[in-house]
Image: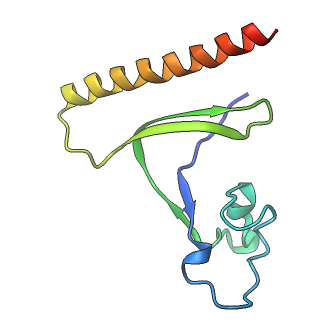
């Protein structure tokens, strides 16, 4: 199975007017980003106007068996680091996340 990770934020409540209904694409409610946000107006290939995309240099996303994100972490692409500093930071960051995942796996093995 392949996955695509999109970094996004919902800004629905930022300028909501009183008694205004959420867009139809908010199947799971505002601020619960899903594939529906990208299906706002499929006829014209428009995504929800409240959906804003971001970017990171490096990201890791941990999901459950249903593909729901349970944890994530990232380094922002706007950090002013040299290529060598990026490699060091990414290595530190991946070791930290690997330790976290191993802890989760260890906890699950203990539960079995």
Q: Is residue 26 above or below residue 86?
A: below
Q: For the image shown, how many numbered marks are present on the structure? A: 0
Quarter in which the C terminus is drawn: top right
In-front residue for pair 111/99: 111
* Percent position of residue 19, x then y: 74, 90
Q: Is residue 80 above or below residue 106?
A: below
The residue located at (79%, 29%) in the rendering is 65
* In this picture, residue 48 sits left or right of residue 36: left
Q: Hey, which quadrant is residue 29 in on the image?
A: bottom right
Q: Hey, which quadrant is residue 37 in on the image?
A: bottom right
The residue located at (68%, 91%) in the rendering is 18
* Percent position of residue 21, x then y: 76, 83
The residue located at (73%, 40%) in the rendering is 68
* Percent position of residue 43, x then y: 75, 73
In-front residue for pair 10/54: 10
* Percent position of residue 77, x then y: 33, 45
Q: Is residue 3 above or below residue 110?
A: below
Quarter in which the N terminus is drawn: top right
Q: Name the residue at the bottom extreme.
A: 18
The residue located at (65%, 10%) in the rendering is 106
In-front residue for pair 107/4: 107
* In this picture, residue 106 sits left or right of residue 92: right
Q: Which colour style is shown? A: rainbow
Q: Hey, which quadrant is residue 28 in on the image?
A: bottom right
* In this picture, residue 29 sits left or right of residue 15: right
């Amino acid at each position: 199975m392949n996955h695509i990770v999109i970094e996004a934020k919902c800004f629905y409540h930022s300028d909501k007017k009183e008694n205004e209904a959420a867009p139809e694409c908010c199947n799971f409610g505002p601020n619960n980003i899903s594939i529906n946000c990208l299906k706002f107006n499929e006829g014209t290939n428009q995504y929800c106007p409240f959906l804003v995309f971001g970017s990171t240099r490096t990201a890791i996303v941990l999901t459950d068996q249903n593909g729901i994100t349970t944890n994530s972490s990232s380094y922002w692409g706007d950090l002013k680091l040299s290529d060598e500093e990026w490699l060091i930071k990414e290595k530190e960051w991946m070791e930290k996340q690997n330790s976290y995942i191993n802890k989760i796996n260890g906890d699950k093995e203990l539960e079995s």
